[in-house]
């Protein structure tokens, strides 16, 4: 997170550094998944959820429960593909920067 904060200061951007980190991580995983030569059963699910994560990040302030749900679906879909584990870990770390969702008021 420190790296992202430094980038914000240097670039003068108003973008939340957590959002920037999420966008970078999702972009990396999407590229690596697209170039992965082996087809697997849940690849479409992973691609759809990565698109959803990208859209949430593009919207500014993503909802933590939706981020976590998408992360779970992506991890379940590609978790056994060891070639993608580094990029998946980066996405997981980016989602964790958002902390936990506030408690619901039921």
Image (tube, grey):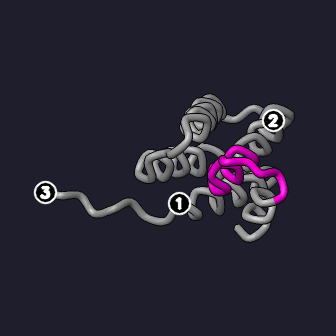
Q: CA distance from mark 2 to mark 1?
A: 32 Å
Give the position of the C terminus as an image quadrant.
Answer: bottom left
SS category of the residue bearing label 3: loop
- Residue 103: image quadrant is bottom left
Q: CA distance from mark 2 to mark 3?
A: 45 Å
SS category of the residue bearing label 2: loop
Residue 63, percent from left and from top: 44, 47
Identify the mark at residue 106; answer none if there is no mark: 3
Q: Earlier in the sequence, mark 1 or mark 3?
A: 1
* Residue name at image x 72 percent, y 58 percent: 90
| 18 vs 51: above or below | below
Closest to the camera, between mark 2 and mark 3, is 3
Front-most of 44 and 3?
Answer: 3
Count neighbours of disc 1 (C-alpha within 10 A) and say few if under 14, some if 14 to 19, many if 20 or more.
some
Q: CA distance from mark 1 to mark 3?
A: 23 Å
Please name the residue that numbered disc 2 is placed on.
38
The residue sitting at the bottom extreme is: 2
Identify the mark at residue 58; answer none if there is no mark: none
Residue 56 lies left or right of residue 37; in this view the side is: left
Residue 101, percent from left and from top: 38, 60
Residue span colored magenta: 10-24
Residue 78 lies left or right of residue 104; in this view the side is: right
Identify the mark at residue 98; answer none if there is no mark: 1
């Amino acid at each position: 997170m420190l790296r992202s904060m430094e980038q914000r200061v240097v670039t003068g951007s108003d973008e939340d550094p957590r959002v920037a980190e999420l966008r970078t991580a999702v972009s990396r995983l999407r590229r690596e998944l697209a170039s992965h030569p082996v087809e697997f059963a849940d690849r479409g699910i992973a691609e759809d959820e990565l698109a959803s994560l990208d859209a949430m990040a593009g919207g500014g302030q993503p909802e933590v429960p939706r981020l976590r749900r998408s992360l779970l679906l992506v991890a379940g879909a590609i978790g056994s593909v060891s070639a993608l584990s580094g990029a998946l870990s980066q996405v997981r770390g980016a989602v964790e920067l958002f902390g936990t969702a506030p408690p619901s008021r039921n």
